Image: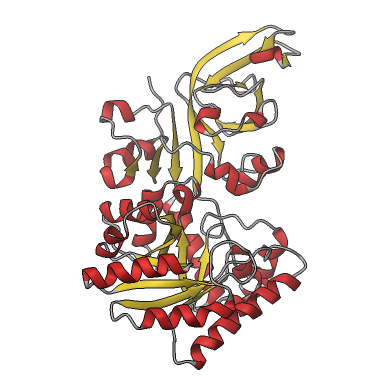
């Protein structure tokens, strides 16, 4: 019989709004080979912690770029819309904003730069647009005038990252051009730090100074905006002077903070400050067998058993986003125990040592990423010399996401 967790079965029965991924029949989705669970409770706790840190007057812009850092664009946007402390959503691609509108996400959405969808469609769907160069400004201004629809825009200042945005000395000219159009409303201005997670804040302070210079120029010419946002995750944790009127966070949202020191700095301001990952990656046991000592396991015979060993084959691999560099270099959680991965990670399968888990049976669920020391996202990232975001972002979009 299939060993389906009770909360998983319940979530599948709650309706299509809680199950995200390929459209499958219930018979097909009741026993997926692997899936991602998103904890609504942990997500809401993270938002609550962020709000306590920044205070009631500052807004939260949740960054959902790159499939919400691998968590799932639509399910995380749904969590944001349910939580009244989240004021804005930011995506990189305009097409992602359109998907969210199609999925009944009505809250404000900001496009951060990837215009892969006609401007007309974005304006008609009331999506806030970033303006980072003159060509974009002219196109958005012309389309707003043509449609006679008020279009909300945020100006992007390049304060030193040298990517998208106007230099501080250019910001007045572009703002004065835009305010002449009765259908353009500048509601925000922002920039992005290059190294706010560095112990040396010299360059970050210079960026903040240049950004504030841009604000001062606009204010001196009678141009004010509602949303001023430059603080990313690191700056939100450690630089209150950079909070502006809105913080724009990715890692904080997903329970990662890059550096323990920044976490401690936040706790100095909010003693009970806590962040928790709300994503768990799970897969099923496909087969179980016992092999003798001195048996090679997997491709290239990269692991040799040193004793009689019970192994379980788990239905997940590097196609699903479980990095191949975790071969012979990771742990998984099953029946309350952490057990090692044996041999190389395959495209669709891995092998684990379940000798010490006598109750193991077919179709049991195995947790590969979760809130247990040893399989937390930061643990996996350290093993392969990556950052937390890489682990999340590589999770295959086709994996079904379930909110529990």
Residue 255 can be seen, yes or no: yes
**269 is higher (above) or lower (below) than 303:** below
Across and down, in percent, residue 26 comes to 27, 30
* 97 vs 223, nearest the viewer: 223
Pick the quarter of the image with the N terminus.
Answer: top left
- Horizontally, is 385 left or right of 247 in the view? right
* 271 vs 124, nearest the viewer: 124
Across and down, in percent, residue 211 comes to 59, 78
- Horizontally, is 211 left or right of 320 in the view? right
**Scheme of colours in the image:** secondary structure
**25 is higher (above) or lower (below) than 376:** above
Residue shown at 72% from the left, 70% from the top: 203
Residue shown at 70% from the left, 43% from the top: 382
Image quadrant of residue 344? top right
Residue shown at 31% from the left, 38% from the top: 12
Across and down, in percent, residue 193 comes to 62, 66
**402 is higher (above) or lower (below) than 131:** above
* 77 vs 267, nearest the viewer: 77
Residue 86 can be seen, yes or no: no
Image quadrant of residue 97? bottom left
Across and down, in percent, residue 292 comes to 69, 6
Residue shown at 35% from the left, 67% from the top: 140
- Horizontally, is 204 left or right of 86 in the view? right
């Amino acid at each position: 019989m299939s060993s389906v967790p009770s909360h998983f079965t319940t979530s599948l029965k709650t309706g299509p709004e809680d199950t995200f991924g390929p459209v499958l029949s219930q018979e097909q989705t009741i026993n997926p080979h692997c899936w991602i669970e998103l904890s609504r409770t942990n997500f809401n706790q993270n938002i609550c912690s962020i709000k306590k840190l920044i205070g009631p007057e500052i807004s939260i812009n949740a960054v959902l770029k790159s499939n919400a850092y691998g968590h799932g664009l639509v399910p995380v946007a749904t969590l944001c819309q349910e939580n009244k402390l989240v004021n804005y959503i930011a995506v990189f691609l305009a097409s992602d904003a359109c998907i969210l509108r199609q999925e009944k996400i009505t809250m404000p959405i900001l496009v951060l730069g990837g215009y892969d969808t006609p401007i007309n469609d974005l304006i008609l769907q009331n999506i806030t647009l970033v303006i980072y160069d003159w060509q974009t400004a002219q196109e958005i201004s012309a389309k707003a005038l043509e449609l006679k629809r008020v279009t909300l825009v945020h100006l992007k200042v390049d304060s030193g990252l040298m990517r998208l945005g106007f230099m501080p000395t250019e910001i007045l000219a572009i703002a004065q051009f835009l305010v002449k159009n009765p259908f353009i409303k500048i509601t925000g201005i922002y920039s992005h730090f290059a190294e706010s997670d560095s112990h040396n804040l010299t360059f970050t302070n210079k960026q903040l100074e240049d950004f504030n210079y841009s604000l001062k120029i606009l204010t001196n010419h009678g141009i004010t905006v509602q949303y001023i946002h430059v603080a990313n995750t690191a700056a939100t944790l450690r630089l209150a002077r950079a909070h502006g009127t809105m913080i724009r966070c990715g890692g904080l949202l997903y329970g990662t903070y890059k550096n323990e020191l920044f976490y401690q700095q936040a706790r100095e301001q909010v003693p009970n400050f806590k962040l928790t990952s709300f994503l768990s990656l799970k897969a099923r046991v496909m087969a179980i067998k016992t092999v003798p000592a001195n048996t090679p396991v997997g491709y290239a015979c990269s692991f040799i058993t040193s004793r009689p060993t019970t192994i379980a084959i788990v239905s997940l691999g590097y196609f699903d986003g479980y990095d191949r560099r975790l071969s012979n270099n990771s742990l998984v959680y099953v029946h309350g125990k952490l057990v090692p991965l044996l041999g190389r990670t395959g495209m669709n399968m891995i092998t684990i040592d379940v000798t010490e888990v006598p109750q193991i049976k077919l179709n049991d669920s195995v947790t590969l990423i979760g809130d247990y020391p040893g399989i937390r996202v930061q643990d996996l990232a350290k093993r392969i010399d990556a950052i937390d975001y890489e682990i999340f972002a590589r999770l295959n979009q086709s994996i079904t996401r379930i909110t529990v």
